[in-house]
Image (tube, helix red, strand yellow):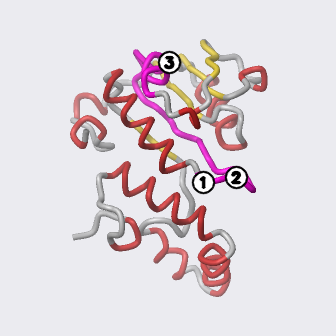
Amino acid sequence: LAPLLAIAAEEESCSQPMKRVAVLGATGGVGAHVVRLAAEQGHHVIALARDVSKVTAPVAEKKTLDLTSRDVDALAAAIKGADIVLSCIGNRRGEDPIVEAGTATIMAAMAKAKVPRLALISSIGVGDSRLQLLRAGFGGVIFSAIFATLLRKTKADLNAAEALAIGSPAGTFFGSARA
């Protein structure tokens, strides 16, 4: 999977304009914004969400998909032909974390559908950005402390998802691929 999902793809494939963009989590705060921007820029947007009636931007395709089902075949069929998958999935307050498991499902579906690129949202303080947060001064230290305590399940889930997406073994330095 690593060569297929490398974010820094071969030069010739990186220079090609995006055409078909699949957005998972298309109705969330970030997802809705990403869908709108991609549509405004003229991309063929495939908006995937649990409730596509909430997709307000004019998109080429709307597909209902509940990622918690972990149905790789259904997701592969929904994203087939996409040039990139933009994962805007996130955890809901009071529910079990889903980002790591969702990312694993997305990556398996991408391999099956032969979609070459993945980009996913995360958070400051996750992966190697933790050090950037600490360098931000007192506010960064306070946010880091809150993130590490009150939001520890979300932080662990995002760290694991990032590690999975970049091919880093879980538990490496802050979830990043450091040598």
Q: Residues within 10 Å of mark 3 (few under 14, many from 20)?
A: many
Q: CA distance from mark 3 to mark 1?
A: 23 Å
Instruction: Identify which residue is drawn at 37% across, 52% down.
Output: 164
Q: Nearer the viewer, residue 30 or 106?
A: 106
Left/right placement of residue 67 relative to residue 1 reads right
SS for callout 1: loop
Type of amino acid under label 2:
Glu
Residue for badge 1: 97
Q: Quadrant of residue 13?
A: top left
Residue 77: within the magenta? Answer: yes
Left/right placement of residue 161 relative to residue 152 reads left
User: Which region is colored magenta?
Assistant: 72-97
Q: Residues within 10 Å of mark 1 (few under 14, many from 20)?
A: some
Nearest to the eye among marks 2 and 3: give it: 2
Residue for badge 3: 78
Q: CA distance from mark 2 to mark 3?
A: 25 Å
Where's the C terminus, which quadrant? bottom left
SS for callout 2: loop
Q: Are marks 1 and 2 in contact (CB under 8 Å)?
A: yes
**Residue 50, labelled with which disc?**
none
Residue for badge 2: 95
